[in-house]
Image (tube, rainbow, N blue to C red):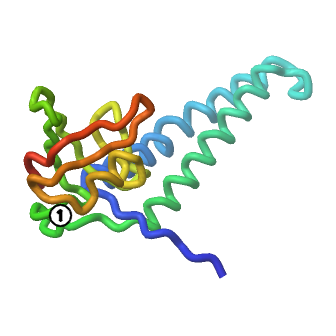
């Protein structure tokens, strides 16, 4: 008996995954199908690199569709009213200030499925996410990074 993992998504994260699934279904699938039809015109499919490339792309698109469908089936969307502001939890927008007070960093704590560090969507399973989870305004946060220990203080928490 396998135990399913609970996936909690922010409303924005849920919508982003849903849009990606629709794009795959309504844009990518038809494009790949057209590539397959066109590549068959190049002769024997057994020795047709165009056809093989299209088949590989089709397999990739289909696996992504299946994975997104599975994720959306398992996922629950966090009710914005349930996003905490008295402590850091999933969906919280956290402003950290460096120990010397010179640098600020605003991040949103999310499930790993929704993680996008380039856009400051930080996984609760990452070193940063684990360090801030459950913290309150004024708490010190110690993050173990490749360059060493980085110290911050929680400046604010909002939705």
Q: Quadrant of the C terminus?
A: bottom left
Image location of residue 67, percent across then percent down: 55, 54
Q: Is residue 36 above or below residue 115?
A: above
Image location of residue 74, percent across then percent down: 46, 67
Residue found at x 68% / y 41%: 59
Q: Is residue 53 above or below residue 14?
A: above
Give the residue at mark 1. Answer: 83
Q: Is residue 19 left or right of residue 59?
A: left
Which residue is outermost to the top? Answer: 42
Q: Is residue 36 left or right of residue 66?
A: right
Q: Is residue 116 left or right of residue 51?
A: left
Q: Is residue 78 above or below residue 96?
A: below
Q: Label 1's element?
A: loop
| Residue nearest the viewer, comparing 90 with 131 | 131
Q: Is residue 81 left or right of residue 142?
A: left
| Residue nearest the viewer, comparing 100 with 154 | 100
Q: Is residue 101 above or below residue 78?
A: above
Q: Quadrant of the N terminus?
A: bottom right
Residue found at x 49% / y 69%: 5
Report the number of numbered marks.
1
Residue found at x 29% / y 34%: 119
Callout 1: few (<14), some (14-19), or many (20+) C-alpha neighbours within 10 Å?
some
Residue found at x 23% / y 56%: 91
Image location of residue 53, percent across then percent down: 73, 26
| Residue nearest the viewer, comparing 94 with 148 | 148
Image location of residue 12, percent across then percent down: 25, 50
């Amino acid at each position: 008996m396998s135990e399913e993992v609970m996936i909690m998504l922010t409303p924005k994260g849920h919508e982003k995954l849903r849009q990606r699934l629709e794009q795959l279904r309504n844009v990518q699938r038809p494009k790949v199908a057209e590539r397959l039809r066109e590549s068959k015109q190049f002769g024997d499919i057994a020795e047709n690199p165009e056809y093989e490339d299209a088949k590989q792309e089709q397999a990739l698109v289909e696996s992504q569709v299946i994975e997104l469908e599975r994720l959306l089936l398992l996922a629950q969307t966090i009710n914005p009213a349930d996003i905490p502001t008295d402590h850091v939890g999933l969906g919280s927008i956290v402003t950290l200030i460096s120990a010397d007070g010179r640098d600020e960093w605003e991040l949103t704590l999310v499930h790993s499925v929704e993680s996008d560090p380039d856009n400051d969507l930080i996984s609760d399973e990452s070193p940063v996410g684990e360090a801030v989870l459950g913290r309150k305004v004024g708490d010190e946060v110690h993050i173990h990074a490749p360059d060493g220990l980085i110290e911050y203080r929680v400046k604010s928490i909002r939705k």
